[in-house]
Image (cartoon, helix red, strand yellow):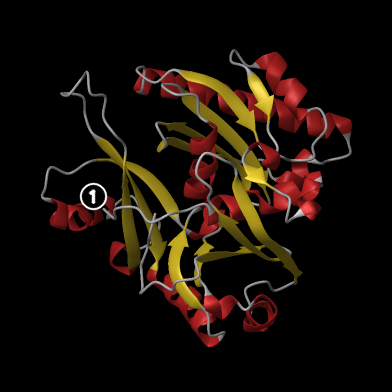
């Protein structure tokens, strides 16, 4: 997902993401027929993470100006909607999608930056309706993010979204010919995605934050576990009805540090549930600090976004 592009730099990607308590920076090198190597992971604590001061420090210490930078919007900074794909030429696609979104957004469509992501159709059912994801963010937000990086002398090339970061990781863990569900949590809540053949087919937000998952009161924590289970069951059932040609083989639970969640889901869902760690995808030899569960959760989406590679833009 690319909200905008600029000229490339030759030294590769550096992903910079803004969390509630600071800024994460990650750099990943893909290796053919081997795990991607985490070459850099750094966290800068800050009460106001999206600040020029934090980025200027990051730039100085990491020589970030040598890279083309990507960042990622937070859960509440954009809307992701599934729409029917307009039957129009490629160069008219975004205009047609913009028209369809005019009554679906919680702000005026003229104030939106819009991108689209195709959902591949079932080759055996060509007559099936064709859907796609539409991503919309306020122009003012996109402009402010560009300005923030520009003032810190950083070359912001791509603005991404968490769904695509999670898709990047899920795609590397798929079983050939099978779909894969993945669930992660952060301060914005839970994120369920389903990928198939490295494409994003489903995204659902679950209104349970990481802090609620780590709740020490066992009754309140159990209540959150039950809520997650119900939301997963509904989403998986809905997906099975909508995309019955995709056989979802299992659910992978990203690192959370929440004791008992994996066991609860495994006992209450009809499909296998496995807990994953970053080592399943990445070579962490250059980043031993990422062996810690809390750090794995913190960097999960940042490293997922850092896995991005140039794709054909819709």
Number of residues whose C-alpha sits closer than 10 Å to that of mark 1, classed few (under 14), some (14–19) or many (20 or more) = some
Q: Please tell me whether mark 1 sits on a helix, a strand or a loop.
A: helix
- The total of numbered circles placed on residues is 1
Nearest to the observer: residue 27 or residue 234: 27
Q: Is residue 308 left or right of residue 270?
A: left
Q: Residue at x 57, y 26 (%)?
A: 232
Residue 110: image location, x then y, percent: 28, 67
Q: Residue at x 22, y 18 (%)?
A: 124
Residue 61 x %, y %: 70, 79
Which residue is labeled 1 in the image?
100
The location of residue 88, given as percent across then percent down, is 11, 47
Judge whether 271 appears above or below 198 on screen: above
133 in relation to 219, above or below? below
Q: Quadrant of the N terminus?
A: bottom left
Q: At which x and y percent is residue 27?
A: 60, 61
Residue 38, quarter of the rendered image = bottom right
Q: Quadrant of residue 217?
A: top right
Q: Residue at x 82, y 47 (%)?
A: 292
Residue 243 to residue 302: above or below: above
């Amino acid at each position: 997902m690319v909200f905008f592009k600029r000229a490339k730099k030759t030294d590769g990607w550096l992903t910079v993401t803004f969390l509630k308590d600071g800024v994460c920076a990650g750099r990943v090198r893909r290796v053919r027929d081997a795990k991607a190597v985490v070459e850099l992971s750094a966290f800068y604590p800050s009460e106001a993470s999206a600040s020029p001061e934090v980025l200027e420090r990051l730039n100085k210490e990491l020589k970030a100006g040598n890279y083309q930078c990507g960042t990622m919007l937070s859960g509440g900074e954009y809307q992701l909607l599934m729409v029917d794909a307009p039957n129009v030429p490629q160069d008219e696609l975004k205009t047609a999608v913009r028209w369809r979104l005019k009554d679906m957004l919680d702000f005026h469509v003229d104030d939106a930056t819009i991108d689209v992501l195709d959902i591949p159709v079932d080759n055996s059912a060509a007559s099936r309706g064709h859907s796609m994801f539409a991503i919309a963010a306020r122009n003012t937000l996109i402009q402010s993010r560009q300005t923030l990086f520009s003032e810190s002398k950083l070359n912001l090339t791509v603005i991404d979204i968490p769904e695509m970061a999670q898709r990047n990781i899920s795609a590397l863990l798929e079983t050939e010919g099978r779909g894969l569900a993945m669930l992660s949590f952060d301060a914005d809540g839970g994120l369920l995605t389903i990928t198939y053949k490295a494409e994003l087919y489903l995204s659902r937000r679950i209104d349970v934050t990481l802090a609620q998952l780590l709740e020490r009161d066992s009754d309140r924590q159990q209540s959150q576990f039950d809520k997650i289970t119900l939301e997963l069951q509904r989403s998986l059932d809905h997906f099975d009805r909508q995309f019955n040609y995709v056989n979802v083989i299992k659910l992978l639970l990203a690192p959370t540090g929440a004791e008992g969640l994996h066991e609860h889901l495994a006992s209450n869902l009809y499909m296998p549930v496995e807990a994953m760690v970053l080592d399943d995808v990445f070579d962490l030899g250059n980043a031993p600090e990422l062996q810690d569960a809390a750090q794995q959760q913190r960097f999960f989406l940042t490293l997922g976004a850092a896995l991005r590679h140039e794709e054909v833009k819709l």
